[in-house]
Amino acid sequence: MAMIDRAVESALPEWRSFYKVCHENPELSSQEKESAARLAGIFRDAGITVTEKVGGHGVVGVLRNGQGPTVLIRGDMDALPIVEETGLPYASRKTVTLPDGHTVGVMHACGHDMHQTVLAATAQTLGALKDQWKGTVLFIAQPAEEIGTGARLMIEDGLFEKFPKPDYCIALHVNHELMTGTVGYTPGSVWANVDSVDITVYGKGGHGAYPHASIDPVVTAAHIITSLQTIVSRRINPLQEAVVTVGAVHAGTKHNIIPDTARLQITVRTFTDDVRKEVLDSIKRIAVHTARAMGCPKDPDVVVLDKEFTPACFNDPELTAHGVKVFSEILGEDKVLLRPPSMGGEDFGRFGKHLGVPSFMFVLGVVDEARYKASLEPGGPALPTVHSPMFQTDPEPTIRTGVRCMTALAMSLLNGAHR
């Protein structure tokens, strides 16, 4: 590992600067033109064959180095519509105007600036250490993770037909609860299935003063919302995980008008196919029969948005155990932490699932030591979460840990240590 450490330390100032450029210049999902160009340039400088515009702004870098396994390393690029409030000297001040005319801030509030940096630095490090490994590395700079479409669009654009098929898929994600210098791992299910469901309830509009002459879709929607809460508590085994959240309710225009329709927008999180089916079936059953019981003129529309589905991310247990061994040798066992699964979504799981090959995503601590320890004190300040306008990383130690771990894991797989 000494050669990795030397390569990392010598290039760390360059990568710190690269990270700050990424952080200061975020781009929303499907708009990652400059981010993609920066990464493509880094890949080319490292002697990597580059193809741009794969599935939108996706970039694929192929580094061939003789016979051996093929390892896919993925980093995502997109940012979020959030006004940054960190006060950092390199904070994003960017705003964009959306198609509806609404102006929003743009911020790397989910750490994809760090993901880009670790991907770029790992590419440079593996390129510089080609005498230490054999095989092929597929570097994936992925767009549109935040909206759940990026991995799917790259696959649909022929990712695994045009480029080498990997034997392993690996990635990382920042973690706002872990201190710099540490990583976390979760064997098995690590990120959840994500489904979006739209329900339109049909009523009969009228004057709010004469509700008896109407069929109120708002009241029907309210009954549906409360009944949906019984799915997790009464339909799903308590030892299995599921989330049903009504995130938006849209109905009406004025105080005294009963509308014709009410719309619900729901997010569903599950880990297994059978629980997912039970939850989605239950949502439809509850919506339809509640509307019928309330005398609605027609059954509600219950639409599962297939294009927004993100499959669960599953960490292959054997590959995960191998990763833990590699990380423990680099960082020490006390810095490699078992983490619970998350009900959040992450479309990295599409790559391994599509091919049926092992995949592993670990999490990377980003909180500087002083802030982390202060948060543990009674009444101490809470750590800002991802997707918060206050979220930030401690760049240098985070980059160091991420690149050391990702490079060492990739090299061990390329050299057949996992077999």
Image: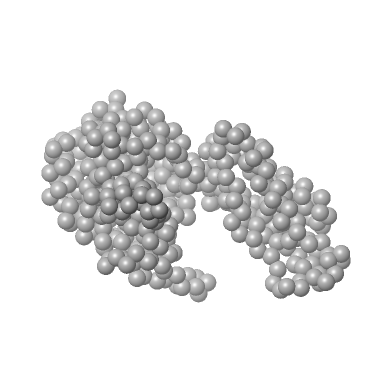
Seen from the viewer's position, the closer of residues 138 and 263 is 263
402 relative position to 103: left or right? left
Find residue 411 and report its image quarter: top left
Find residue 186 and report its image quarter: top left
201 relative position to 275: left or right? right
Residue shown at 30%/37% (left/top)?
336
Q: Position of residue 215 (x, y in %)?
A: 82, 61
Visual colour scheme: one colour
Farthest top residue? 419
Seen from the viewer's position, the closer of residues 207 and 315 is 207
Residue shown at 12%/50% (left/top)?
10
Whether residue 135 can be seen here = no
Farthest right residue? 213
Residue shown at 87%/66% (left/top)?
213
- Badge count: 0
Please say if 117 is above or below 329. Answer: below
109 relative position to 67: left or right? right
Q: Quadrant of the C terminus?
A: top left
Q: Position of residue 100 (x, y in %)?
A: 52, 72
Seen from the viewer's position, the closer of residues 204 and 413 is 204
Residue shown at 57%/45% (left/top)?
243
Q: Position of residue 96 (x, y in %)?
A: 42, 71
Whether residue 329 can be seen here = yes
Please say if 207 is above or below 310. Answer: below
Q: Quadrant of the N terminus?
A: top left
Q: Position of residue 304 (x, y in %)?
A: 61, 49
